Amino acid sequence: SNAEITEIGVRWCIAQSKELHEAGVPAIHYYTLGKARNVAEIVRAVY
């Protein structure tokens, strides 16, 4: 389902963002593509 696909994508993005953040990457740019709630969830989980 679309909800399951979204959840997989958000979890994957959180994992990758955490890895980048822990590696000292100074900034991560997210394209919301009209899905600000998804990006907000990712940012809360990482920072």
Image (cartoon, rainbow, N blue to C red):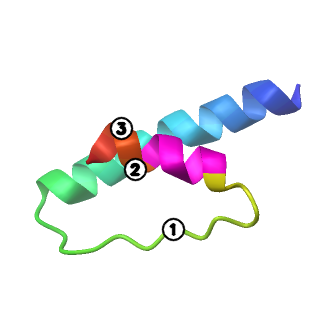
| Three-letter code for the amino acid on which mark 1 is drawn | Tyr
Q: How many marks?
A: 3
Displayed quadrant of residue 10: top right
**Element class at badge 2:** helix
Q: Is residue 24 left or right of residue 14?
A: left
Would you say 29 lies left or right of 22 here? right
Q: Where is mark 1, residue-wise?
A: 30
Q: Residue at 40%, 50% (x, y): give it.
A: 43
Q: Position of residue 21 (x, y in %)?
A: 20, 57
Please say if 3 is above or below 19: above
Q: Residue at x 25, y 58 (%)?
A: 20
The residue that label 3 is drawn on is 45
* Mark found first going from the N terminus, 1 or 2: 1
Residue 43 has which mark? Answer: 2
Magenta residue check for 40? yes
Disc 3/disc 2 C-alpha distance (Å): 5 Å
For the residue marked with disc 3, what is the amino acid?
Ala
Bounds of the magenta segment: 37-42
The answer to whether mark 1 and mark 2 are in CB contact below 8 A is yes
Furthest-right residue in this view:
1
